[in-house]
Amino acid sequence: MDQNSASRIRVAILGATGYTARELLNLLLRHPRVEVTALTTRQDTEPHLADVHPLLRGRLDLTLENLSPQQVAQRADCVFSCLPHGASAAIIEPLLANHCRVIDFSADYRLDDPQVYTHWYQVAHPAPERLAETVYGLPELYREAIRAACLVANPGCYPTAAILALAPLLKEKMILPRGIVIDSKSGVSGAGRNPKPNLHFPECNENFTAYAVGQHRHTPEIDQVLGDWAKPPVSVIFTPHLVPMNRGILSTAYADPAGDRTADAMLESLAQTYADEPFVRVVKHLPGTKDVVGTNCCDISLRIVQGKVVVISVIDNLLKGASGAAVQNFNLMYGFDETTAL
Amino acid sequence: MDQNSASRIRVAILGATGYTARELLNLLLRHPRVEVTALTTRQDTEPHLADVHPLLRGRLDLTLENLSPQQVAQRADCVFSCLPHGASAAIIEPLLANHCRVIDFSADYRLDDPQVYTHWYQVAHPAPERLAETVYGLPELYREAIRAACLVANPGCYPTAAILALAPLLKEKMILPRGIVIDSKSGVSGAGRNPKPNLHFPECNENFTAYAVGQHRHTPEIDQVLGDWAKPPVSVIFTPHLVPMNRGILSTAYADPAGDRTADAMLESLAQTYADEPFVRVVKHLPGTKDVVGTNCCDISLRIVQGKVVVISVIDNLLKGASGAAVQNFNLMYGFDETTAL
Amino acid sequence: MDQNSASRIRVAILGATGYTARELLNLLLRHPRVEVTALTTRQDTEPHLADVHPLLRGRLDLTLENLSPQQVAQRADCVFSCLPHGASAAIIEPLLANHCRVIDFSADYRLDDPQVYTHWYQVAHPAPERLAETVYGLPELYREAIRAACLVANPGCYPTAAILALAPLLKEKMILPRGIVIDSKSGVSGAGRNPKPNLHFPECNENFTAYAVGQHRHTPEIDQVLGDWAKPPVSVIFTPHLVPMNRGILSTAYADPAGDRTADAMLESLAQTYADEPFVRVVKHLPGTKDVVGTNCCDISLRIVQGKVVVISVIDNLLKGASGAAVQNFNLMYGFDETTAL
Amino acid sequence: MDQNSASRIRVAILGATGYTARELLNLLLRHPRVEVTALTTRQDTEPHLADVHPLLRGRLDLTLENLSPQQVAQRADCVFSCLPHGASAAIIEPLLANHCRVIDFSADYRLDDPQVYTHWYQVAHPAPERLAETVYGLPELYREAIRAACLVANPGCYPTAAILALAPLLKEKMILPRGIVIDSKSGVSGAGRNPKPNLHFPECNENFTAYAVGQHRHTPEIDQVLGDWAKPPVSVIFTPHLVPMNRGILSTAYADPAGDRTADAMLESLAQTYADEPFVRVVKHLPGTKDVVGTNCCDISLRIVQGKVVVISVIDNLLKGASGAAVQNFNLMYGFDETTAL
């Protein structure tokens, strides 16, 4: 690399112990215009990155530190927050005040309506006035707004897979906004790195379950963005399931057609919508999660069965569903080629 | 065991190389009233059972033989056919003529209408007149007919999970028969023991896919049995998926409610329907496949989400979805306690 | 079942929340001469068995209770303790005083020498005088002593696989007692049901590691029993590994030959040793864990490579390596057929 | 990328349907100095890359072609052969004659002695005179020779893990060359992409087996390279095992110490040997395969147990064990930074 470090964006990652931070680092460390200058943890011990993420040993010589927002702002131009909701907004507000640009992995700035936020997350939002102003970081839908944003709300993993599949069909009035079923299946890394009884290997392995049926917090996010594109409000039936594998989401969405278009016509319309997108591939075959794991791609296909439109989409939940999308957003915000490091 | 062998039913298993035959043997070999007298294969080599199924080494000293129907009929009172469709009917006809009672794992006698059979299986049926007469071997729905039957069509694995969840709700007019979505997920043993590219370990492992969307041959079987209980015909939207695990099916069914009953009321109705069933457990929590793998049980739960009824059911595809159901049918046919060996 | 309950042995299981207790119950509930009368937990909440082990829902209507040794002794003739070491001995002493017979899954009574126990477990033993007197519950080696025992120390899972493979070869002086390497690989259920960071699904899945190299507490147990059969003391090099699967242990043992016997001769000797054993199968092919998972069997094979004897053995760690062995011991202690319920 | 394509090395991949070719492409397509110009298959159908490797859809617009060596030589400066042994040498000879430089993934040029080759591979070598001249492509051992080579024999996956762990200890006379046991465990992708009964998902999943004990073709390769470093000849006892996971090899090697050095001293010596190596990390903890999967790294640790030296090493079998090593060799051959694209 012939770029000198002076031309690099200084980057900090907050909450660097989890899987999304590991994947993010794995991408950023091969980004020619990034210098990772700070990693934070809220724990008192300040471990070396190599001990937290053995996969990254030798790639970056930094320890995770328990830093104040001011310390972070001194070291970084751009901050990726991998903190959980609530904790994330609390630190993002002072970072913005200190002129950092921020990409937030949590749900704190994804919803427009503070009341919806409070209903689903059971806490009051620390900066409700910022909610409706924050850009939802799905480049395929909101690219121009992302370029100019100081704060980007990185989308949830389930919403990314479902929205990319459904939003164009809703916008083109090919499917009806009522009664949409989204039956989603996710690998276990989506549940984070903290051990829990139901994620203990012998409980999770060789098992398949639904969970949080009708109660998953990604529901209002899907409703909001789909409603934004469908115009009439949308209230999806969202059913997440846990698959005994590490990575990948497959979303099977069911909707009623709004006209009499054939499956081929709908598929062609999707293909045209995404023709110039570097990371969305509309395919005729039924895609599997292995087609996208390790990439920032979303593969989408469509069938009509007994008069019902069935749209299937796959992503890597840790990349297009989290860290890959974040780097894509970062590239847009700083004017780099959108595919850099991806 | 103090029963002498004279009082035992002599049993043959056709097509004994596959997973369903292995599971069937594992059950029958601890059945106090069964003597396994013949195992068949259509291959010329006649291997010992221990080499075909190492798990059963030492349990039964038999080789698999390439036997004619007449030879089978001489050795066995009751025949379980684990042959594929087409091959199964071809041998079952002479077996019935030779006074064997038969439990057929294939789809050959599940459908009532020869034209529907021909449409989905692309062959003419060798004994079309027997189709409408054959008992569908789901004890919870057709117990009395099974007791008297000479030929029982053992149900498919996907249909078992879906029908047990939906038939009572349709019969009680709690859900509408139109637009039912059945989003099913199965472990890989359901695809049989023959190696195929998409079932090669590194292709299948850490992957999740839909397959045969709108084209799976279990569809007409589900439509037929649900229609029989709903009375108006049913045409489900059926979407099977492959889960990277060995055993288990989870079915997530979506239907529109027919009245204004609550989820609790529907769940209570299901519980009452199955109150005396030894192998159906209606539960309040969301069941996972691990709750039933290794058993002949079907666990069912129900939610209402955004006005849509969501019914979740789980079975072991090789037991309640195949060999366990077959032994349950066998027990009914011969007047044994229905739970013997299960 | 035509036996009346008066003729049944009343059985209690201590520490009934874990995997070994679940497997034990699964076996005992089909044992014609057992009545399970008590299940204990050391937690204050007293959950129903169906909520602790959904797999067993409907099989037994008992809650787990926090019972004193005296309460257990009033309800049970025979007690299986699935408690961890230390906790187990503390309750077993009063149980024995109250005339219960006990099968202990912990390591508390496996070692003969209190000092060795203290060295490896870092606590003093509450009843050191009982150590050298307690029977090691490996029926293939100590069958007669087990029949008469009031207290049986159920063997560890790794020792069972390794000892069954090596003890006869040592006794027959076919291999040298020095420098034996035991490279063992276990499914994750062997580590118990408590969630831990390294057993979190995304950490454990698609990963293979060695652990506790040279420090695993099963080491002195292997040394002791092999030494008992070899006569000169044995100090094995024991290296356990974690396999991303639920069940099964494969042990690959390496030893120097003591003479010039061929591999076939050694295999034949093993076959003769175990000719009458219902649960040991000496085979010519290389066995895999799937050949024994779900059974109480140990499959053993042997090769000589570059002058080194390589002995490979497989068991189900939860059955022959724990609960199956316990039921086998129980059958011996009460004079039932050794294979009952297995 | 601002390099124009004139400055790029034109690269062909032979036998591009398998896993090593997919991984190789994934690396080469982000190499700034590579242009992939040809992909070959020996099948008559000439599928598009996107259909063979859906993961790479959109990355490269090429079909796989059934090309002659001359056609390949016209299009490419450097050829990576992912063909099986025998087939590989047959095409490499004309490629070399046409002035291509070649990196061969097969075993055809790894062994120095044609008789050893014939013994293990059961065929005569087409160019026996080239055997002893060909460079073994393990950069950590033979870096300078690789730089100048026209033909590099890319090492086997098992040998890479074992040799990196043991060669320095042998060279430094810290371990004895006799009686070395190498107990290796590999993910299933190492067995290739062709479906086989034992690699069928339900056979392989939840199973652990040894295979080819004492007969694996990587044995002479390990013996040869370790002997080259130890000077006295080496004959290892090599036992491969199959782990139910996609990627990764862990090698557990056992050797007798040659002196009285402590484990710490040996570990320190290893650390010094590899201090400047970009892809070997000597660590104190016990490494797992997940620490290296997706990277070109080999992590090594060491213990002494009961007087036996135990060396544990892990690699990604498809990267450091195949395609990553190939790119590392390519970088050396063309004078690029050794870590480019890795």
Image (cartoon, coloured by chain):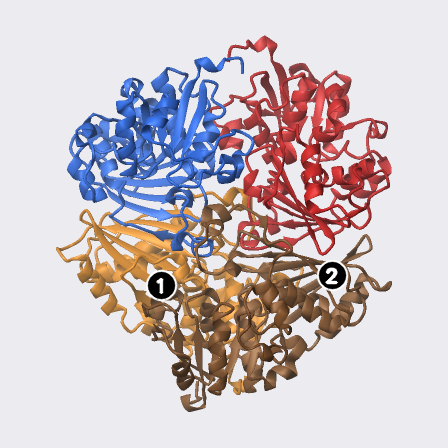
Chain colours: A brown, B red, C blue, D orange
Q: Say if C34 sits above or below D288 in the image.
A: above
Residue closest to the eye, D330 or C247: C247
Residue at point 48% right, 75% down? Answer: A90
| Residue ID for mark 2 | A302
Q: In the displayed structure, does residue B255 sit left or right of residue C45?
A: right
Residue at point 48% right, 44% down? Answer: D206
- Quadrant for the N terminus of chain C, please: top right
In which image quadrant can residue C37 be found?
Answer: top left
Q: In the displayed structure, does residue D157 sit left or right of residue A245?
A: left
- Report x, y in % for residue B129: 86, 28
Q: CA distance from mark 2 to mark 1?
A: 43 Å
Q: Say if B155 sits above or below D18 in the image.
A: above
Residue closest to the eye, D131 or C224: C224
Residue A16, numbered circle? none
Residue closest to the eye, D177 or A207: A207
Q: Is residue D100 visible?
A: no
Q: Say if C35 sits above or below D282 in the image.
A: above
Q: Secondary structure at mark 1?
A: strand
Residue at point 40% right, 19% down? Answer: C338
- Report x, y in % for residue A145: 64, 83
Chain identity of mark 1: D
Q: In the displayed structure, does residue D30 sit left or right of residue A270?
A: left
- Quadrant for the C terminus of chain C, please: top left
Both labels 2 and 1 in a single chain: no
- Report x, y in % for residue C276: 37, 19
Q: Amino acid at mark 2?
A: Leu
Q: Nearer the viewer, mark 2 or mark 1?
A: 2
| Residue ID for mark 1 | D298
